[in-house]
Amino acid sequence: MAKFGFLSVLEEELDKHLDYDFAIDWDKKNHAVEVTFILEAQNSGNVETIDDKGEVSDEDVIFEDYVLFYNPAKSRFDEEDYLVTIPYEPKKGLSREFLAYFAETLNEVATEG
């Protein structure tokens, strides 16, 4: 039976469960995997919104957030930069079942909220 790497399983599960854009970035030097999620909310009523920089717009709203999978012994990062940070065990990674659950849960949260 073929053995799949963490990144390929993660990408496969996200492809299977998500209906929105995402990107995976492997930071080899920092032993971390950053997943970027991009959600677009239609603003068909042209309601004015104010972004985090104080700019007003009546365009569609685009949300971008990040999740980090990291090696607790080697990765360095600012936890406040991420929606969630998830440690993985070196040499073991994370199971396919966990990654499938992660993708399913992420999709549920995004579509409900």
Image: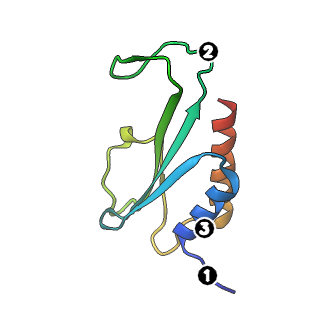
Image-based side of 112 in relation to 79, left or right:
right
Q: Quadrant of the C terminus?
A: top right
Image-based side of 2 in relation to 62, left or right:
right
- Secondary structure beneath label 1: loop
Specify which label sits upstream in the sequence, 3 or 2. 3
Q: Can you identify the residue that label 2 sits on?
A: 45
Name which residue type carries label 1: Lys
Q: Can you identify the residue that label 1 sits on?
A: 3
Q: How far apart are marks 3 and 2 (CA)?
A: 39 Å
- Relative depth, front residue between 27 and 64: 64
Residue ranking furthest to the bottom: 1
Give the number of the disc on residue 9: 3
Q: In this view, does 102 lie above or below 59?
A: below
Label 3: few (<14), some (14–19) or many (≥20) C-alpha neighbours in 10 Å? some
Name which residue type carries label 3: Val
Mark 1 or 2, which is nearer the eye? 2
